[in-house]
Image (cartoon, rainbow, N blue to C red):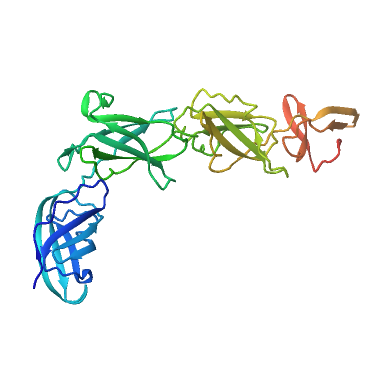
Amino acid sequence: VSPVLYKPSPLPMLSSKTKTITVHGYNFGTDASRLRVSFRSANNMLVGAQQITCTIVSVFDTSISCVIDQPIYSGSISATVDKYLVSPGATYISTKLYTIANYYSEPIINKAPVCTVARNSASMSCSFSILDTTINNSPVDTYKVEYKTSEANSWSVNQVINITSNDVIFANNDTSTVLFSIFGLSSDKIYYVRLTARSAERSLDSFPSPAEHVKSNGRPLAPSPPYLYLATSSSLTVDCVAQDDGGSDIIGYTMNYRNTLTTDLTFRDVSVIANRTVTTPLYYRVVINNLKVLSTYQFTCNAENAFGISMSSSSISDITTLGAVPSSPRNVLVEHSYNRGDSVTARISWLPPTFDGGDQPMQYLVIRNAASTPTILRSITNVTANTA
């Protein structure tokens, strides 16, 4: 005899997402392994699947109790009871379909709260629009605010907002938009915020809203690699530019450098040489003097705000000083000169220049100035002594 399914008992109003549903009828038998109870929404609005199968917890000849733990949007649904000849998967001998009007289902808040973090602040300001005014015809009176960091596995309740209270804050007297704040944020964290509507009258909760995510203020991001502004033979002028100030004004930079031609590859901090206070928030320039000619130096840069010091710039910059013209030879002396027929002989001596321009001189030029016309008398190369 085919089982008969008629109108189920009223669904229990549980705040939990798990619901026990009892379907009444007759000729069900008592063997739960030969029965299947499933539900389908009239407009296929089930969440996660078009059809949900109940987990049977008890069965009698005239009733079946089963547990459903998946969300269903509001609307009409159909319940189906299948009775199998042997076990599920074998040929069933009967089925019955019944449509249940106005099936209770918890509403879903479709829109996430909107949150922003103010500069130099350890709090966020949020707002949300009141979209769900009732749960199963029971008025919504509170919204639960939950938040967590991206590393956390569970949500924490931050506050419960009673929209019927005189303390609730609305946006510009707009009673459909509620404002709230979350304080005590840790720096450099990604936070997620969500809402759950609740009706105290029947202790009913909605499904949580989608989660809004926002980054708290923190240390600046690593600056871009330092780059050359001006080079001479003995100094480098190098710029550092912050990528992002982390939500708080840049108060200083640290520039570090080292000479790649030496065995000591330790970076020197030149922030003590330059002024750490910057007048242009995202820009810093430092001049490093007393460097070697034609030498390559590596630079890194860090930015600092009220929350701390950033990571070093993303890559090391190689910057080379220029070569230079040597200074004049010193102590040039004509030791003696005399006439021998039509010729003039002179013995000239000198000392090397004080500054060689970064390398040993390649040659010396002996030049005679006569009648304001310079004439090269001799090009002397490979000089190692002080005289020639």
Pick the front one: 284 or 251:
251
Rendered location of residue 44, percent (x, y):
15, 56
Rendered location of residue 79, percent (x, y):
14, 60
Residue 57 position by quadrant: bottom left
Residue 252 position by quadrant: top right
Q: Is the residue 173 above or below the residue 55 in the image?
A: above
Pick the front one: 381 or 291:
291
Labels in figure, total: 0
Q: Looking at the figure, which quarter contains the N terminus?
A: bottom left
Judge from the rendering whether residue 360 lies leftward or rightward of residue 129; answer left or right: right
- Image point (21%, 36%), residue name: 140
Judge from the rendering whether residue 180 lies leftward or rightward of residue 345; answer left or right: left
Q: Is the residue 30 above or below the residue 349 in the image?
A: below
- Image point (51%, 22%), residue name: 279
Pick the front one: 308 or 322:
308
Pick the front one: 278 or 210:
210
Residue 381 position by quadrant: top right
Q: Is residue 32 visible?
A: yes
Q: Is residue 343 visible?
A: no
Rendered location of residue 364, percent (x, y):
78, 36
Q: Looking at the figure, which quarter contains the C terminus?
A: top right
- Image point (68%, 41%), residue name: 266
Rendered location of residue 264, percent (x, y):
72, 42
- Image point (76%, 27%), residue name: 369
